[in-house]
Image: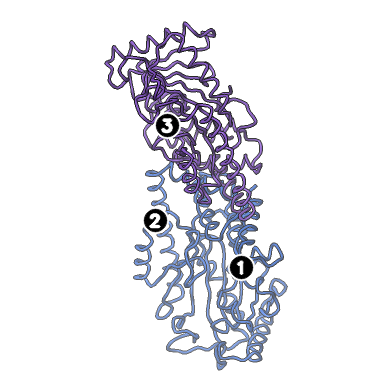
Chain colours: A purple, B blue
Amino acid sequence: MNNWINGNTDSNNIVLSSRVRIARNLDKVPFPHKLSEDESKDVISKVQDGFFKAIKDKESFGLISLDEISKDEVQYYVEKHVISKKLSENKNGAFILNKDETLSIMINEEDHLRIQSITSGLNIKEAYDEANKIDDFLEQNLNYGFDEEIGYVTACPTNLGTGLRASAMLHLPAITLNNEMNGVLKALTQMGMTIRGIYGEGSKAEGNIYQVSNQITLGISEEEIIRNLQGTVSQIVNQEIKTRELVNNKFKYELEDKIFRSLAILKNSRLLSIEEGLELLSNVRLGVEMGIIENITQKFLNELLVDCQPSSLKRILCKDLSNNEINFQRAKLVRERFN
Amino acid sequence: MNNWINGNTDSNNIVLSSRVRIARNLDKVPFPHKLSEDESKDVISKVQDGFFKAIKDKESFGLISLDEISKDEVQYYVEKHVISKKLSENKNGAFILNKDETLSIMINEEDHLRIQSITSGLNIKEAYDEANKIDDFLEQNLNYGFDEEIGYVTACPTNLGTGLRASAMLHLPAITLNNEMNGVLKALTQMGMTIRGIYGEGSKAEGNIYQVSNQITLGISEEEIIRNLQGTVSQIVNQEIKTRELVNNKFKYELEDKIFRSLAILKNSRLLSIEEGLELLSNVRLGVEMGIIENITQKFLNELLVDCQPSSLKRILCKDLSNNEINFQRAKLVRERFN
């Protein structure tokens, strides 16, 4: 699998990444929010032992305990979509991560185990297969909570059944601009899916980047979930492409104006908020995807999308920053990258 | 005198130009708005004959009749501040202009004669002296309407007395930004002066460019008018400089951000309205005047200030343009000039 940020791939137009995560819990162990520090550490040890016993390619993986790294370091993994916001809030949490940062096993998130696989472009099936392999390795040495009737036991009932959540991250500026998002959301809801902002539940769709994911995990097979989502995302991609053509036919100069101004501001601003930065990056991304801007790669834009996030920025600069300073430093970083 | 737009001069910071105009009327001839076409032409002939008989440097001057040039050509002279809007509206009007476009004699404006002298920087006295010379030449062969009590007779009572209006064009972004303009206007009114937008009466202060001029022409000597205005403009310039320092101390990064973004947009936009264009040019001018932007001259900015006006633009492109096209062509012209 390709790292979604800097993996070289041709097919990462519109769909930035595909992700699958599987929720699992250890049998007869209380859910993470009921565990003491010691009990939490016990879960981590069990998972760690079980995983590393089973896996062959041991040196590709490492365990990171959240209490051993700085808060910004933790947030940096969130900003890269390597771990969830939920995990980042539990100092008794940990995660196992591969070198490419495409596979992660979150420990003591909402469930004991959240196996996540993330790759670039529209490759939900591939992400699912890889997550499945990890799941199989883990199951060799761990006893999962499982019920014949309801499937895998999870802390939240919305994850019961397969415990599977698949999602794709999409760049939908034209659908957004053309006010088609409500229609998309309505259609998705009817199909048991939903659409959210770039950082999942409750987050805004900053920079016109959205996550489409399945809502239903019960009474449906894993293969169906994957197939449905893959099909639905393809449809949204087609709608976005058609809307782009429409916008380009009707407002060619307005569109070019917006794109070239955005690029110019990114190259020249002295203060840049995260919201504006993401909006401008979205416009430039649109220009790149439509062939209006040349010599800028998706990889470059993905890296910038992550690196201009607050914690990534602090990590790169190796220092804490006030709100004013961060907008100054963000502008500086973005300027230097572009020039 | 230096042409205010492209004359090379060092002292054109903040004060773009100084202008003096003298209103005169032929004795016993009705005011222009009461004249038929033939009578108007008669006035033009009289002025033309009288002027060219008196002036030595004949080949430096030429007469332009408004009915002989296109509407855009006429407007182009207005946009360059060579003639007034009022004159441009009278197809029976004409003007004598020197090669440098620093001296013009408008014929059949509100008054039969409006002698105008315009130069770069803060040089009101010089402009006055030059206008005075032209006035003397004209008076050799023309009989002016004059009353011992009220002075020179003019069509509008606000010009009675000296018939002299002196003005300076100033770039006041900091005073505007810092909401000090109302205070300036109030102080000026008390001194018998006023401040208006770039194209005089009723025009907005687009691009933070203002005209300060005397209001009172009666019961005050010409020299006093000139001295008062020169002093007042110097004070406003000082206030602008102080306010710039204040803004720069308090909002250094915000200011630089605004300036560099403006330059970037001018270099890259695909659609540019006149209002936005002037606003951005003002920000860049501020950057140049404050030494934040290098390698851009006042001359370059002055030329662009005029050339991005609607009629100048049409004249440069030699074609009529719709409103949409004009914003496209303005963006193109500005881009090409900057790059």
Report the residue marked by disc 2. B239
Asked whether the residues under the numbered discs 3 and 2 touch, taking CB atoms below 8 Å apart as contact, a structural biologist would say no
- Foreground residue among B15 and A210: A210
The chain containing the residue under callout 1 comes to B
Closer-to-camera residue (A143/B247)? A143
| Residue A73 visible somewhere in the drawing | no
Mark 3 falls on what kind of element? Answer: helix
**With respect to residue A204, does B211 lie above or below?**
below
Tell me residue B295's x, y (percent): 59, 45
Q: Residue furthest front?
A: A149
Residue B135 vertical position relative to residue A89 in the rendered view, above or below: below
Label 3, label 1: how many angstroms apart (C-alpha)? 56 Å
Q: CA distance from mark 1 to mark 2?
A: 28 Å
Residue B183, horizontal then vertical, whole percent: 34, 62
Residue hosting label 1 = B102
Q: Residues within 10 Å of mark 3 (few under 14, many from 20)?
A: many
Which quadrant of the view contains residue B177?
A: bottom left
Which residue was labeled with disc 3?
Answer: A310
Work out how far the residue at label 3 is from the one at label 2, CA to CA, in angstroms. Answer: 40 Å
Q: Residue at x 38, y 66 (%)?
A: B185
